[in-house]
Image (spheres, rainbow, N blue to C red):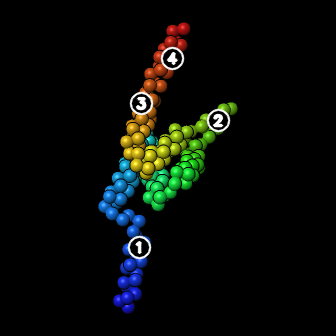
């Protein structure tokens, strides 16, 4: 029975040997945590504004995208294989994003909702891919830019709308 347990132990060690040393463990951890945190930042902004896709959704999308590129990269995949993986992630996230887009019928014209949420999820996936590929600085910069767009642009649009309304009333 002792030999049997030893064989089980050796097999388990081999199965969990994809992270071989402290350097690789650190690299994987940093990339996945970076993806999770950056996705969470964008998700918090969306959840704070009452949108359906919030913190957890954005974090999972970012981690998933990072993992999809991290594992093949760790396995030594060539550039053409990585390109196909990224194409799959991009197309696959499109299906998730499509689920956030709704069309409401209001009178004669339809009103589409959820496009910004869909675009945000798509962006979150791209940020996750960046983090998964070890491009953490690019991922952080992209997150800051996206957060600025999601936070500041509605205010800028309101300012221009007020100015246009004021000018229309004067004319």
Earlier residue among tags 1 and 3: 1
Nearest to the eye among marks 3 and 4: give it. Answer: 3
Nearest to the eye among marks 3 and 2: give it. Answer: 3
Instruction: Determine whether the residue tagged by mark 4 lies in a helix, strand or loop.
Output: helix
**Which residue: 55% across, 54% down?**
81
Earlier residue among tags 3 and 4: 3
The alpha-carbon separation of the residues under discs 2 and 4 comes to 24 Å
- 105 or 21, which lies in front? 21
The alpha-carbon separation of the residues under discs 1 and 2 comes to 57 Å
Nearest to the eye among marks 1 and 2: give it. Answer: 1
Residue hosting label 3: 152
Residue 117 horizontal/vertical position (percent): 51, 41
Instruction: Determine whether the residue tagged by mark 3 lies in a helix, strand or loop.
Output: helix
In this image, 37 relative to 95: left or right? left
**Which residue: 41% across, 41% down?**
138
The alpha-carbon separation of the residues under discs 3 and 2 comes to 27 Å
Residue hosting label 1: 14
Residue hosting label 2: 110
Residue hosting label 4: 165
- The crowd level at tag 4 (other Cα within 10 Å; few <14, some 14-19, many 20+) is few
- State the quadrant of the N terminus: bottom left
Q: Residue furthest right?
A: 108
Earlier residue among tags 2 and 4: 2
């Amino acid at each position: 029975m002792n030999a049997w347990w030893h064989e089980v132990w050796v097999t388990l060690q081999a199965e969990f040997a994809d992270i071989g040393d402290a350097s690789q463990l650190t690299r994987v951890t940093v990339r996945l945590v970076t993806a999770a945190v950056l996705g969470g930042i964008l998700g918090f902004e969306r959840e704070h504004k009452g949108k359906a896709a919030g913190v957890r959704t954005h974090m999972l999308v970012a981690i998933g995208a990072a993992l999809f590129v991290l594992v093949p990269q760790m396995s030594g995949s060539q550039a053409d294989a990585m390109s196909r993986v990224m194409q799959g992630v991009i197309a696959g996230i499109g299906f998730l994003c499509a689920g956030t887009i709704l069309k409401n019928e209001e009178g004669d014209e339809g009103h589409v909702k959820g496009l910004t949420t869909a675009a945000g999820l798509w962006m979150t996936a791209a940020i996750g891919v960046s983090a998964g590929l070890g491009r953490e600085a690019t991922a952080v910069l992209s997150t800051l830019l996206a957060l600025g767009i999601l936070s500041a642009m509605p205010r800028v649009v309101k300012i221009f709308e007020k100015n246009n309304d004021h000018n229309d009333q004067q004319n």
